[in-house]
Amino acid sequence: MDCHRGVWRDLGRYGRVAWRRCRGGAAMNIADAHAQLKRAIQLYNDLGGCFHAAPPWTSAEENTIREAYAAGLSLPEIARLLARSQAAVKLRAHYLGLRRPAARSGWESRADDAMSRLWSAFDDDTLRDLWTAGVQVDDIATALNRSAAACRLRASQIGAARPEGFYGAAAHRRAAE
């Protein structure tokens, strides 16, 4: 049998292995190469033209995903329930437009919750007033229930300026305290 490169290439990984063996990678007579090609073609056809194909999603499975997401089941539980991989379930849920709220564990602090909040006009005014009054960043962060880094960034974004001389000798005295 003639080892035609295009036929082997179309058969994915199994065909590439057979092609390497056929072209001299290992000792293989033409009868063995032909038998291996026939097995690969049969496997390819049995799987619907793809070596890694899973059965198509049914509407019942899609409904199960919707119900499981609504019930709050975890991804591994849904995957076991459907006998599918977690990646397949996650991808199908995304395709169906299903979203879960971000999970928060109990050890996360209130500062983590504060970091996800948007800045209101009241927060901006409070930050600007405290910033221009020369209040320390840690105290401002505590007052606004935000991180010090978030307060520095927002002060920069809204153009708040520190009072005259804040970064001069007074800053050295504050650092020494």
Image (cartoon, rainbow, N blue to C red):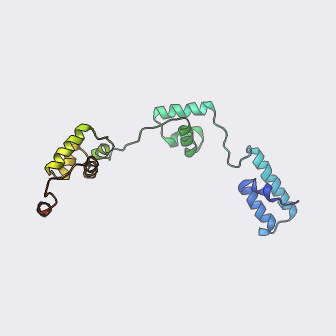
Across and down, in percent, residue 45 comes to: 77, 46
Tell me which residue sits at (11%, 60%) in the image.
Answer: 170
On screen, residue 106 versus residue 95, left or right, reads left
Q: Quadrant of residue 32?
A: bottom right
Q: Quadrant of residue 23?
A: bottom right
Tell me which residue sits at (53%, 42%) in the image.
Answer: 90
On screen, residue 145 versus residue 41, left or right, reads left
Q: Is residue 1 above or below residue 160?
A: below
Q: Is residue 143 visible?
A: no
Quarter holding the C terminus? bottom left
Q: Is residue 161 visible?
A: yes
Count of number-bearing discs: 0
Q: Is residue 69 above or below residue 39?
A: above
Query: Of 130 and 5, which appears nearest the observer?
Result: 130
Query: Of 125 and 139, which appears nearest the observer?
Result: 125
Query: Of 8 and 172, which appears nearest the observer?
Result: 172
Across and down, in percent, residue 37 comes to: 81, 55
Tell me which residue sits at (76%, 48%) in the image.
Answer: 44
Query: Of 87 and 158, which appears nearest the observer?
Result: 158
Across and down, in percent, residue 1 comes to: 88, 59
Tell me which residue sits at (81%, 64%) in the image.
Answer: 22
Across and down, in percent, residue 172 comes to: 13, 64
